[in-house]
Amino acid sequence: MLAPPAFVLGPLAGLLVLARPRTLREWLCVAGSLAWTLIWLLQPDTSLVGQVVRASAVLLTGAFLAMTVYRPSADLSRALLATGAAALALASWTGVFGISWAAVSHGFERELWASNRTFVDQLSAAGTAAGGAGPLLDQLSAAASATAALLPALLVLAALAGLRLGWSWHHRIAVKPLGEPPARFQAFAFSDQLVWLLVAGLALTLVPQAPGWRAAAQNLLALGGALYAIRGLAVFSAGSGRLSRAGCALLTLVAMFLLPFVVGGLTLLGVADTWLDFRRRRATPAT
């Protein structure tokens, strides 16, 4: 929800155009998506982070549409390939203009710190954090530093989510959409080879390394952990069909208070699904 809108609306507009709009609803969606994307892209923003994010959205949309023209597919692999191609193009773009990723990360951290400072000042003015403004600001600053270090992983996750939403909305809006519709969330899966993201991240944390390698390890672990946690949630969702809505609401409420343990458990469940394939075992009829 906090990701740039162009990560969703750019691919959506391109997909609708490739599907050759035929109805007024399709044309209105194309016009609205393009207008919103252009307004976001043309906003005055001279910060380095804003320029990199805008370039990421444009490159991601182009790579995804090019792969859609080549071979439409509802698999996550196409979104991963498009994201990887956009990342390589972004790395080339930053290299040409002499932009270091450390400068982008520090700029993002400064923006987060400024936002946190404004937030704490507003709380202090309202009397809410009169006695704890200093410790609260320290906690928010530490969180801003950790978040800025994970900016590459956050951008990749936002790109994958945006492409998935764009593909889903395309099939809801277009009269004759491209390719197959996306599968239900309970069937969410991806190539088992992605387990090497976690292996590489863990390997980099076990050897002496420079700050750049440490940041790479953190981003690989964050990206792989998030994908496998989502996969674990899909496995749990597929196996919780007998739970009532009240039971699901109760589990969600409990999970909010035990979030680190829940995310860790879902990640382990997603990793185990790589070899055990719980959903296929559950769907196999009893002999």
Image (cartoon, rainbow, N blue to C red):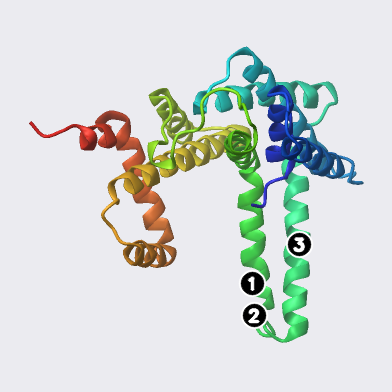
How crowded is the residue under tag 3: few (<14 C-alpha within 10 Å), some, or many (20+)? some
Residue 23 in the image, given as x and y percentages of width and height? 73, 34
* Amino acid type for the residue under numbered disc 1: Leu
Is 189 positioned to the left or the right of 141 in the image? left
The residue under label 2 is 132
Query: Circles 1 and 2: CB distance less than 8 Å?
Result: yes
How crowded is the residue under tag 2: few (<14 C-alpha within 10 Å), some, or many (20+)? few
Please report whichever mark, 3 or 1, sits nearer to the chain's N-terminal start.
Answer: 3
Please report whichever mark, 3 or 2, sits nearer to the chain's N-terminal start.
Answer: 3
Residue 121 in the image, given as x and y percentages of width and height? 77, 75
Query: Circles 3 and 1: CB distance less than 8 Å?
Result: no
* Amino acid type for the residue under numbered disc 3: Ser
The residue under label 1 is 136
Residue 177 in the image, given as x and y percentages of width and height? 61, 27
Query: Circles 3 and 2: CB distance less than 8 Å?
Result: no
Residue 115 numbered mark, or none? 3
- As helix, strand or loop, the secondary structure at mark 2 comes to loop
Residue ranking furthest to the top: 70
Q: Nearer the viewer, residue 269 or 278?
A: 278
Is 82 positioned to the left or the right of 267 in the image? right
Q: Residue at x 57, y 27 (%)?
A: 79
Q: Is residue 26 visible?
A: yes
Q: Nearer the viewer, residue 88 or 75?
A: 75
